[in-house]
Image: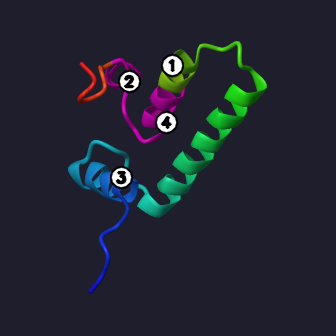
Amino acid sequence: MACPPPRALRDLQCGIASGRFAGTDPTTALSALGGTLLSLVALRLARPDLDGDEAASDMAAMVLRMLGLSADDAHEVTRRPLPGLD
């Protein structure tokens, strides 16, 4: 019995299949996303004075643009309230 893919990989596959994300290899995209997350952690450790929420939203918008969303769409998505936190 095969295990389902991790959620991030599954979400990338769904985004590519739906046409929302640019057609790319989901495993390569997942690797890029992981590197981006590590970079954000390093940035926050090196620069504790930065607004962490703003830095995370900016980084998420950059990632969504890398995946093919327009700048406006990426900005709108990253400024939405997180589900279950309202």
N-terminal of the pair, mark 1 or mark 4, is 1
* Residue at the disc numbered 3: 12
* Residue at the disc numbered 4: 63
Report if the CB atoms under discs 1 and 3 are less than 8 Å apart.
no
N-terminal of the pair, mark 4 or mark 3, is 3
* Residue at the disc numbered 2: 78
Q: Position of residue 65 (x, y in %)?
A: 45, 32
N-terminal of the pair, mark 2 or mark 3, is 3
Going by the numbered disc 1, the residue's amino acid type is Asp
Q: Residues within 10 Å of mark 3 (few under 14, many from 20)?
A: many
Residue span colored magenta: 59-79
Task: Please report the residue visible at 64 percent of the width from the left and 43 percent of the height from the top.
Answer: 38
Going by the numbered disc 3, the residue's amino acid type is Leu
Figure quadrant of residue 39? top right
* Residues at marks 2 and 3, CA–CA distance in whole angstroms: 16 Å
Q: How many numbered marks are there?
A: 4
Going by the numbered disc 4, the residue's amino acid type is Val
